[in-house]
Amino acid sequence: MAPSRWRILEGKVAAITGGTTGIGRAIALEYLRQGCNVAINHLGLPKDEVHKLSLLEEAAALKAEKVEGETKSKAGELLEVAGDVSKSDTGTILVEKAVEKWGKLDVFVANAGVFEPAEFLSLDHDLFDRTLRINVNGAFYCCQAAARQMVKQGHGGSIIAISSISALQGGGLQVHYTPTKAAVLSMIQSMAISMGPHNIRCNAILPGTIKTQLSEEEIKNDVTRTKLEQKIPMGRAGDPSDIAGPALFLASEELSPYCNGTQLLSDGGMFVHLQ
């Protein structure tokens, strides 16, 4: 994507969980491009080091870019913080690090999540519990930490949770997963009521099938991919960058000042395609 002459989030500070790959990474890069300083959370696993390093390189390249009329780049800075969102202090540490470096928090994106397809009758209880801890507990802990900071600051903010089309539809191999995404959506709706008086807007994005590590097994199989694409009126699975725009929209108080408790589907028309 070419550098934008618009800096919609210039001077803002955001924190994003699960920010080195997939949707979280795409959102982080778009926020940086739009002038926002961004703190990302990641697990810090050795196998994921390559993703972290390549993200840092991309962020540095954005920082080196200038658009016409600029004497220096206005792209934001990137901070990376390791931690497991299923632990209650990880969100607090991420928020604290962002505030320590940049003095405030304006936007928070609860993106971190896991999905491993499994047959219901043989679904391992540990997999069910792990999916719940990361997708639901992790979102709660992190959103609560962000909300506390925003209330303390007293000038509002935006909290965005990445739910899923799976919050609205069932899936044969998703009996352990769909309830977690429905819980995230429900959580955001209640947060919108609770945080509205503080001018903290709480909204959810519901992606359809997006080409990320979570869906790579489904998409790389030609037969499965063809069946999937037939369900999507736009004829393709989404790219992570397809979710960055909605996340930018909901982050901006200029673009979405009255959006609170919104569920924004970004699925190529998959949900409305009955047959």
Image: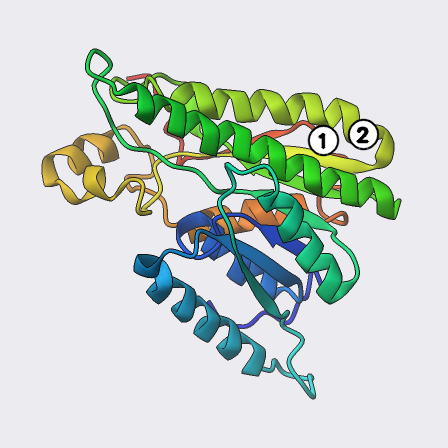
Image quarter where the C terminus lies is top left
In the rendered structure, find residue 196 and report the number of the disc placed on it.
Answer: 2
Which residue is at the front of the view, 258 or 36? 36
Q: Please indicate, yes or no, whether residue 13 appears anywhere in the rendered image.
A: no
In the rendered structure, are the residues bearing label 2 and label 1 in contact, judged by CB atoms less than 8 Å apart?
yes
Q: Is residue 254 left or right of residue 271?
A: right
Upstream in sequence: badge 2 or badge 1? 2
Crowd band around label 1 with a 10 angstrom C-alpha radius: few (<14), some (14–19), many (20+): many
Give percent across and percent down for residue 220: 17, 45
Q: Please indicate, yes or no, whether residue 32 appears anywhere in the rendered image.
A: yes
In the rendered image of this protein, does residue 210 appear above or below residue 122? below
Q: What residue type is labelled 1?
A: Asn
Q: In this view, does 35 lie to the left or right of 27?
A: right
Q: What element carries label 2?
A: helix
User: At 74% from the left edge and 53% from the top edge, which residue is drawn?
Assistant: 105
Crowd band around label 2 with a 10 angstrom C-alpha radius: few (<14), some (14–19), many (20+): some
In the rendered image of this protein, does residue 196 appear above or below residue 30? above
Q: Is mark 1 on a helix, strand or loop?
A: loop
Q: What residue type is labelled 2?
A: Gly
The residue identified by callout 1 is 260
